[in-house]
Image: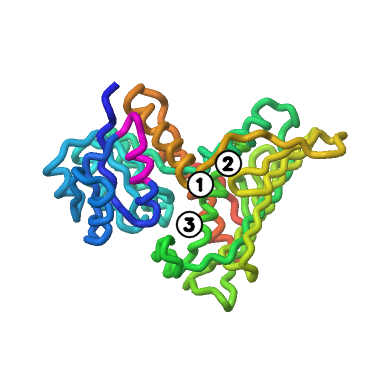
Amino acid sequence: MKALRLILVGLGARGRYWHEVICRSETCEAVAFCDPDPVARAWAETRSPGVPTFGALDEALERVEADALVLATPPDTRDAHLELACRFSLPLLIEKPLALDLETARRYTLMAERADVPLMVGLNFRYLAVTRALKALFTDDRLGPPESARFTYERRRDPRAPHLNKYPMTMAHPMLWEQSVHHLDLLRYVYGREAVSVSCRTTNPPWSLYAGDTNVFALITFTGGLVVSYQGLWQSSWDVPNFEWRTDARRGVVVQREQFGALAYARSEAEALTSVALPPHETWITDTEGVLRAFARTLLEGAPLECSAHDHLQTLSLVEACVRSSALGERVDLSEEAAMV
């Protein structure tokens, strides 16, 4: 099997993880790296001598032959990249979110479809072992269908940290578009349900260093009557992070107490939780490897495309509904958005 020749665009916080994952891959190889920052290009040249670097994607496409692109770029800088990919008929794997508003994401999706270019969104949390194990608990029906859930994610995120992207500092809703988008997508993926309505409130506490709202409180109703209480904080008032995802199903409960593990379940009559064994996990690497393997399977073996842009629109519809609900101060029905997707 030939290696899938990739151009990685973007060598920032997420791009450096992609660099490592691509270089480790047995089915993919990097044929070029692109970033407008000369310091970032020098970083890649040191770690991958022999692989050319470019300041812009059009320069790379003139000089090297590639099978696909990986975009690890800020979501508001992608128009030219999408246009080039469609012109050169290059499949795309793009970091989430696809765009920072639903209209632009729809435009990108339609652009790729018209050019017959596969477009996958890098929703790496779907590829965590704990996520797959959690979904399996509902797929095999040992606990019955989920009836209600509470999803809590709390941290005091310092945007000045050198390993973090800086563009969220000026976003209107950084938590929703950068972090909650993962969580809302997980709810859809694990439960296999679509959102019907949402009541949401977003805030930004006085100590926040972000321009936009960093804390999200939402009550979401999904198909089948499933109700989820969601609390996502990027600016809690405590440095110690907290995570808990509890699902009450018809015949028992499932609890995940760490972002990357600590999964357990119990049937209703049980006196204690039973832990679910999980394989070792290398943070931001194991999950990103899962995304790349899925992308490669589609292009090399003809497997169905996972995390498609069209599917991603459903998650972005929910994100945008949260924004609108908070602005209006009322519940938002997602039926109209679902019809437009």
Q: Earlier in the sequence, mark 3 or mark 2?
A: 3
Tag count: 3
Question: In the rendered structure, which amino acid carries the disc numbered 2?
Answer: Arg
**Considering only vertical position in the picture, is 96 above or below 309?**
below
**In terms of secondary structure, where does tag 2 sit?**
helix
Q: Is residue 312 visible?
A: no
Q: Which residue range is magenta in the image? A: 18-28
| 33 lies left or right of 325 | left
| 172 lies left or right of 145 | left
- Residue at 81%, 33% (x, y): give it: 267
Residue indicated by mark 3: 177
Residue indicated by mark 2: 188
Dot 3 crowding, Cα within 10 Å, few <14, some 14–19, many 20+: many
The percent position of residue 174, horizontal first and vertical second, equals: 48, 63
Between the C-alphas of marks 1 and 3, the distance is 21 Å
SS assignment for the magenta stretch, majority: helix
- Residue at 26%, 24% (x, y): give it: 2
Give the color scheme: rainbow, by chain, secondary structure or one colour: rainbow
Question: In the rendered structure, which amino acid carries the disc numbered 1?
Answer: Thr
Q: Quadrant of residue 325?
A: bottom right
Residue indicated by mark 1: 283
- The question of residue 230 being in magenta is answered with no
